[in-house]
């Protein structure tokens, strides 16, 4: 598990703000989240029966990419952060959710809204080797490691944290954690400005 996403609600009106909280960098895991991004997007799907015929074949043309980004939130270098809140404004002049059906076979389409969360995550390169070690960015200088009175530290040059490499229980080197991207999409409903709805909390484990 990388993060827990909590949304106040999943149904909104045009002009409202999507509020959410992400909890990550849990003590029980060696993974570390370096960056967090949240995007509010809409995606339109055209029913297949309404797509124009392809000139090269008897079938229909491919579904066009009709996604649109409405708002975004970004937080960089969150390796020492455990919780973040974000807010994404829904434009008041946008189009709310709608669904349509076309053709004898009932091809479906319409406009859908979604919240996309992206994490840049640092993970150990070897499994099971770092359960008791915490990732670090500050390294002791070699000339001061055995100095009981003064130990000087230097920052690592990379964005990803470092983990100690041990052989027979003895520390021999530092190894940079590899970086991966984890994304999730949460559908939300956006209604017209004068539509009544019931608020329900929502929690997603990513």
Image (tube, rainbow, N blue to C red):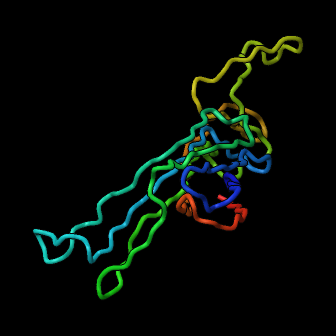
Corner quadrant of residue 108? bottom left
**Residue furthest bottom as drawn:** 104
Left or right for 58, reference 149: left
Camera sees residue 125: yes
Question: How far across and down, in percent of the image, does residue 143 sit?
Answer: 74, 12
- In-front residue for pair 146/154: 154
Residue, x 52% and y 58% (percent of image)? Answer: 114
Which image quadrant: the C terminus? Answer: bottom right
Residue, x 88% and y 15% (percent of image)? Answer: 148
- In-front residue for pair 125/108: 108
Left or right for 112, reference 167: left
- In-front residue for pair 104/125: 104
181, above or below 1, in the image: above
Question: How far across and down, in percent of the image, does residue 81 sit?
Answer: 73, 37
134, above or below 18, in the image: above
Question: How far across and down, in percent of the image, does residue 195 sit?
Answer: 58, 65
Residue, x 76% and y 38% (percent of image)? Answer: 134
131, above or below 53, in the image: above
Corner quadrant of residue 173? top right
- In-front residue for pair 167/150: 150
Which image quadrant: the N terminus? Answer: bottom right
Camera sees residue 164: no
Corner quadrant of residue 64? bottom left
**Residue furthest left as drawn:** 55
**Residue furthest front as drawn:** 194
Residue, x 73% and y 62% (percent of image)? Answer: 201
Question: How far across and down, in percent of the image, does residue 129 sit?
Answer: 71, 47
């Amino acid at each position: 598990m990388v993060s827990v996403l909590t949304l106040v609600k999943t149904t909104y009106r045009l002009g409202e703000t999507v509020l959410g909280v992400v909890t990550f960098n849990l003590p029980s895991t060696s993974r570390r989240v370096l960056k967090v991004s949240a995007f509010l997007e809409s995606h339109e799907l055209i029913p297949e029966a309404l797509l124009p015929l392809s000139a090269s074949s008897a079938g229909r043309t491919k579904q066009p990419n009709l996604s649109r980004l409405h708002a975004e939130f970004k937080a960089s270098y969150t390796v020492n952060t455990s919780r973040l809140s974000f807010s994404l404004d829904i434009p008041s002049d946008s189009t709310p959710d709608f669904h349509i059906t076309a053709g004898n076979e009932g091809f479906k389409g319409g406009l859908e809204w979604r919240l996309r969360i992206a994490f840049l995550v640092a993970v150990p390169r070897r499994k099971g080797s770092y359960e008791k070690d915490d990732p670090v960015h500050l390294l002791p200088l070699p000339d001061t490691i055995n100095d009981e009175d003064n130990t000087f530290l230097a920052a690592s040059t990379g964005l990803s944290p470092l983990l100690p490499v041990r052989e027979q229980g003895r520390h021999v080197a530092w190894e940079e954690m590899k970086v991966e991207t984890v994304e999730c999409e949460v559908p939300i409903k956006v209604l017209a400005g004068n539509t009544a709805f019931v608020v329900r909390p929502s929690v997603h484990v990513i």
